[in-house]
Amino acid sequence: MRALRKTHDGPGLELCEIPEPTPGFAEVKIRVLRTGLCGTDLHLLGWDDWARTQFTPPMTTGHEFYGEIVELGPGVPEGEGRDELKVGQRVSVEGHIVCGRCRNCRSGRRQMCIRSRGIGVNRDGAFADYVVVPHTNVWKQNDAIDPDLGALFDPFGNAVHTCQQVDMSGVDVLITGAGPIGVMATAIARHSGARYVVVTDLNDDRLAMAKNVGADRVVNVGKETLRDTMNELDIYEGFEVGIEMSGAPAALNMMVDHCNFGGTIAMLGLPKNEFAIDFSKVITHMLTIKGVYGREMFETWYRAAFMLQSSEAMRDAVRSVITHHYKAEDWQEAFDTAASGQAGKVLISWED
Ligand SMILES: NC(=O)c1ccc[n+]([C@@H]2O[C@H](COP(=O)([O-])OP(=O)(O)OC[C@H]3O[C@@H](n4cnc5c(N)ncnc54)[C@H](O)[C@@H]3O)[C@@H](O)[C@H]2O)c1
Ligand SMILES: [Zn+2]
Ligand SMILES: [Zn+2]
């Protein structure tokens, strides 16, 4: 089969021919149909310090994907029932494999597992014709979810998980960063009944995507001030909710500056380095800042699936973050496009 692998300790990836994997105990084998590219994959290609500490070549990359079960290993609950699996079932997959033994796992907080391992980071991933994963990581999809939408459940789940931290109904929401995840969060804020949703970025094309999914105002913070927009909308006391989706220190600082007293900030964006914030403001304004990682297993998956099931507008909004499709053979072009910073979500198809 084809597999996009890092074959040696250094930058670059190779599309290789390797044997198909066999599902072990409690594992399923999945024929991969569609995959999504994210920042993690670009780090692995470029081989920065983070990648070097996480990834041991040779290994196959890729963790955002949708496909079809082709084989069940021993010990997998098989059948037609709601919580059973069968060959032919279409699925998306949670990319974190948890230990099941640590305190958080045993207490149902699996997203906080102390031994979490990543598909496509710590074991062979999904940029391949076939991948093998534990059956407990599989999320069954129905026909309403097409392969493109199915491949977005990982980043869409990041957006859902972040928005899960706050109550958005009837309040003003500030979202900083209009990358694919920020745009999906914008759609969720709209869907969740926010009064005003204001989105910031430095890139007008990305801001247009946020506007398209329901942002009331978009602000290019390189050219305009957020305060002017707040004045226009009569957001007098500040935002009750902040959703940080850029990883930029300036964005969090702006959020701290423009939140109402008692505001809550949920932060998914990963800063590259340590940075300073105005803690006296956090304290005197009684702000809550909450870090968010991955997806809650599996409450986030239920919420993500049910939001899409109940709303065609949500399905269209989530799909709208996809700007490029490539075939597996054109993976290098796909990575170049994703790295340009000008694209939305870049998908790679493994069909045919
Ligand atoms: N915590 C997690 O589990 C997790 C998972 C996935 C992604 N992430 C992080 O979430 C963030 C969003 O992911 P994405 O794929 O949409 O990223 P992305 O890099 O595509 O988007 C980030 C956006 O932020 C914008 N930006 C930069 N500086 C800004 C500023 N000062 N103000 C406002 N916007 C600014 C950029 O122009 C870009 O459009 C990234 O930081 C990513 O690393 C975290
Ligand atoms: Zn990812
Ligand atoms: Zn654990």
Image (tube, rainbow, N blue to C red):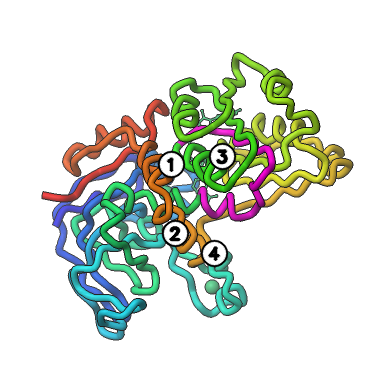
The answer for how far apart the CA atoms under marks 1 and 2 are is 27 Å
Q: Amino acid at mark 1?
A: Gly
The amino acid marked with disc number 2 is Phe
Mark 2 or mark 4: which comes first in sequence?
4
Real-space Cα separation, disc 1 to disc 4, in angstroms: 20 Å
Looking at the rendered structure, the kind of residue marked 4 is Gln
Foreground mark, 3 or 2?
2
Closer to the chain start, of discs 1 and 4, is 1
> Does mark 4's beta carbon lie closer than 8 Å to ligand 1?
no
- Distance, label 3 to label 1, CA atoms, is 13 Å
- The disc, 3 or 1, on the residue closer to the chain's N-terminal end is 1
Give the residue pinned by disc 1. Answer: 39
Residue 58 appears in the rendering: no
Left or right of residue 139, residue 208 in this image: right
Of the residues under marks 1 and 2, which one precedes in the sequence?
Answer: 1
Pointer 2: what residue? 306
Q: Nearer the viewer, residue 341 or 144?
A: 144
Pointer 3 residue: 245
Residue 300 coordinates in the image, percent (x, y): 50, 60
Q: Secondary structure at mark 4?
A: helix
Amino acid on which disc 3 is placed: Met
Q: Which residues are magenta?
A: 159-179
Outermost top residue: 223
Q: Quadrant of ligand 3?
A: bottom right
Query: Residue tagged by mark 4?
Result: 111
The mark nearer the N terminus, 3 or 4, is: 4
The residue under the point 76% across, 33% down is 238
Q: Is mark 1 within 8 Å of ligand 1?
A: yes
Residue 78 appears in which quarter of the rendering?
bottom left
Locate residue 161, reporting x and y percent: 55, 54
